[in-house]
Amino acid sequence: MPTLTYREALRQSIVEEIERDEDVFLIGEDIGRYQGTFRVTQGLFERFKQKRVLDTPISEPGIVGIATGAAMMGLRPIVEMMTMSFSILALDQIINHAAKVHYMSGGQFSVPMVIRGPGGAANQLSAQHSHSLEGWYAHVPGLKVVAPSTPADVYGMLKTSVRDDNPVIFTENPGLYGIKGEIPEDTNYLVPFGQAAVRHEGTDISLIGYSRMAHVCMEVAEALDQEGVSAEVIDVRSLVPLDTETIFGSVRKTHRAVVVYEDWRNGGYGAEIVARIQESCFDDLDAPVGRVGGLNVPMPYARNLELLCIPNKDDALAVARATLG
Amino acid sequence: MCRIRAFEGQSERAYRSGLAGGYLHVYNGMEATAIGWLSSIQPGDPVITAYRDHGHALYLGCDALECMAEIMGRATGLSKGKGGSMHLYSKEHNFYGGWGIVGGHTALGVGLAFGTKYRGGNEVTHCFLGDGAANAGVLYEVMNMASLWDLPVIFIIENNEFAMGTRLEYHAADPELHKRAEGFNMEHERIDGMDVLQVRKHAKRIIEKVRKTHRPYFLEIMNYRFAGHGAADNDQSLYRTPEEVERAKQRDPILLLGKHLTENGIASEAELEAIQREAEEEMEAVYEAAAAQPKPEPDAVYADVYTDMEPERGH
Ligand SMILES: Cc1ncc(C[n+]2csc(CCOP(=O)(O)OP(=O)(O)O)c2C)c(N)n1
Ligand SMILES: [Mg+2]
C-alpha cells in the first residue's frame, strides 16, 4: 500500500474520479492555473484542461449555484471552497437551493455535488478565515456531511461523495493536509458514509471526535494509557449520516464519554452527539457526558490567543479526567 | 510612499522571522493609489478597504508602531492583536477597516454613505476594492442601491491585474471593469494609478463632484502589485513572468515621483535618498519597538466579543 499525505490522497482520489466518470469536473477559485491555494489540485489543470478543472472568478454564490444547476442535469461537480469560511457567502445556494430541490420536486431532481475545502483554524488566519461550519451544514436536511481525518479516509470518502447522488459537504482541515498514511491500492475503495471508525479500543472511557479532533482524542488516549486508563477512540468521520450504533456500543461498554470538536462550543455538532448519547444511553452512563469545544469567540489573530481557542490534548484530557471522576 | 514601502519591507521581515503569521498582503507598487487618493479627501470622510490595508491605514495617520504591533499580534496593536494584518481599524481616523472576505466590505461602504445621507452630512465615503472583488455579487446589489438612493460613495477599484493567482483576463468577461457601472446609471472611468500626482488630480476632481452631487462614482485605478499576492505566495511563475514585473517596476510610483521632483528641480537626488533612508530607519525602529510590545493577556480572548457582556467561558 502506498504511503501518501492527506493532500496527495485527496488529489489522487479526485484524479481517479475524473478519469472514471466524464461527468465529474472541478470548479473553484485558483484551482487550475494557480494549482489550488492549498495545492490539492496541483497538476490537474495541465492534465485535464479547462473543461474538467475550471478556474472561476471570486463569486461563491454563483459558483455553487452553477454547480447545483449542472448537477440537476446530471453532471457531478466537485466544488472547491478555497476555505470553508467562504462557503458562508454561498449559504443561500447550498441551503435554499441545493439541499432542498430533491424534496421540493418530489424526488424528480437530485444534486450529486461535492463541496469540499479546508474547514477550521489554520495558523493565525483570524476571525473571518477560521470557521468550522460542519455543524451548520449538519443541521440542514438534504445535505450529507463528512469530515475525514486520515489519508485513507479522505481517499475513500471523496470517492463515496462523488458517487453519492446528494449534495455532500466534505470538510478537510488545514492542519491535516501534511499528515501521512497508507492508502489502499483500489480505485474503487469506498469508505461508506454512516460508519464511524474505532481508532483505538478501550474499556474505561469513549473519546469521540472527528477531523483534527480525532487526532487529539488519540493523544488523550495515549496520555490516559500512561495513567492506566483504557480509552476507546471513535472517529465519527461521517456526521450525516451518523453512526450511532458504533458510538452507543462503545458508550455501553465504557460507561463514560467525552465528545471533542473544534467548532464553537455553543451549539456545535458535538452537542448533537452528546444529546444523542444521553437520549439513548442514559442508564449506561456512570458520569455526565463530557464536552470539549472551541472557545465561544471569533478566532483572534494573536497566536497565543488563537492557541487558547482550539481544543488541544490538555483541554480534552482535563475533561476526560473529570468525567472519569 | 517611501514610508509605506519601508513599512512593508519590515512587515515582510516580520513574517519571515515568524513574528507575524497568517495572511499578510503588502502594498508595494500600489502606493500612488492610496496616497494620491487619500491626500485629496476631507477630514471626516469614511474610508474602507479590504485586507491589503497597511498603506491606507498609515496614510490616514494611524501610528506605524500600532500597525506593526497589530501585525505582530501584540496587545498594543491597533486592534489589540485580535485582527492582524488584514484587519486594521481606526475609529479615530475614520478608517473602517481592514476586511478579509473578498467584496463583503463594499456593502458596508455603501452603508457608511447611507449613514452620511441619513444624518444630512457632507462626507464622501471612499470604498477601495480589488479587481477580484469586483466579481462579488454583493457589489452589484449595493451599486444599484447607491445609485437609486443617491448615496455619496466612490468605489475605487485598485486594479492590480491579479486576483491572487488569476489574471484579470481569466476572471473578468470585460477587463475594463469600470464599464460595469453603466447599467447602474453611475459615472465611471479608468485612470492610471502609478503616477501619484495624476491620481491626486483626478481624485480632487471626482471627490469634489461627488460631494456636490451626492451621486455615487465608479472608478477603476490601474496599478500593479510588485510582490506576491500575500507573503505565502511563493510561486509567482504560475501567473506571471519576472520580465513582466520588471517592466511594471519601470513605472514604480516612487521612481516616477522622484523623476518628476528632480527633473523640475524641486528636489535633488541626495534629498530623495535622504527621504528614503529616513523612512527605512524609522520603520526599522518601528519593527524593533513592535517586537518588544507585550502579547495579549490570555483573558483578552473573551474581551470585545460583545459590547456589554462576556461569552460563556471555557471549552
Ligand atoms: C469571499 C472570498 N473568496 C475568496 C477569498 C480568498 N482570496 C483572498 S484575496 C483573493 C484575491 C482578491 O483579489 P483582488 O480583489 O484583486 O485584491 P488584491 O489581492 O489584488 O489586492 C482571494 C481569492 C476571500 N478572502 N474571500
Ligand atoms: Mg487584484
Image (spheres, coloured by chain):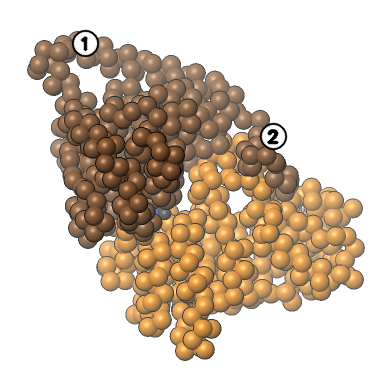
Chain colours: A orange, B brown
Q: Residue A157's spot in the image, x, y percent?
A: 53, 72
Spatial distance from mark 2 to mark 1, Cα to Cα?
48 Å
Give the residue type at disc 1.
Glu
Most foreground residue, B269 or B17: B269
Q: Is residue B252 visible?
A: no
Q: Residue at x 36, y 35 (%)?
A: B123
Position of A223 relative to B289 (above/below): below
Labels 2 and 1: the sequence-earlier one: 1
Residue B253, picture quadrant: top left
Secondary element at tag 2: helix
Give the residue type at disc 2.
Asp
Residue A266, picture quadrant: bottom right
Q: Could you tell me if the residues under marks 2 and 1 are in contact, i.e. CB atoms within 8 Å?
A: no
Q: Residue at x 40, y 24 (%)?
A: B61
Which residue was labeled with disc 1?
A: B271
Q: Is residue B247 left or right of residue B61?
A: left
The chain to which mark 1 is attached is B
Q: Residue at x 11, y 12 (%)?
A: B265
Q: Residue A175's spot in the image, x, y percent?
A: 54, 52
